[in-house]
Amino acid sequence: MRTPAGKECRYYFEDYYRGRQKQECRLLTQNPNSGRWKPSLCRSCPIPDIQRQNACPNLVLEARVQTSMLGMRQEVKVFAVCTRKMVEVTNPAIGCGECHLAQPVEKILKQG
C-alpha cells in the first residue's frame, strides 16, 4: 500500500471505507517497545527502501520509533535478522551476503 510519503510499503495500512479514518504501520505496532507511530514518520522511514532493494525471503525486519536525546525528533530504527544464517544483518538493504550466493545453486538443484 502507498504510504503518506508516496512510497510502497507492505506494513502500512489505511482504511477510509464508510467514514473510517484508520492509518497504521503494522511493523511498528508489533513492537511493544516502540514509540507511537504517526504518518509524518513515513517520510524518513527506511523500510520501503529496504523492501525495494532486498527481496530476500530470509530477511526479517523489526522496527521501533526512537526519540532523540532532546525529545524533539523521532525516527524509525530498523533491526534485521537473517533467519537462514541466524545472524544480525547490519545493512538490511544488502542482506547477510550469504543467502544470495546460495540461491543459484539451490535453483539448479531443484530443477535437476
Image (spheres, rainbow, N blue to C red):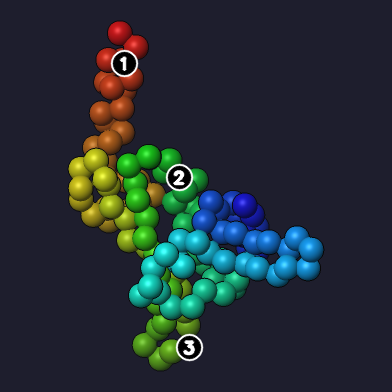
Residue picked out by circle 3: 72
Residue found at the very far top of the displayed protein: 112
**Gap in Å between the C-alphas at discs 3 and 1?**
53 Å
Residue 107, quarter of the rendered image:
top left
Q: Is residue 87 above or below residue 46?
A: above
Residue picked out by circle 2: 53
Residue 14, quarter of the rendered image:
bottom right
Residue picked out by circle 1: 110
Residue 58 seen in the figure: yes
Residue found at the very far front of the displayed protein: 18
Q: Amino acid at mark 3?
A: Met
| Position in image of residue 55 (x %, y %) | 43, 40
| Position in image of residue 37 (x %, y %) | 52, 74
- Name the secondary structure under disc 2: helix
Q: Amino acid at mark 1?
A: Lys
Front tag of 3 and 1:
1
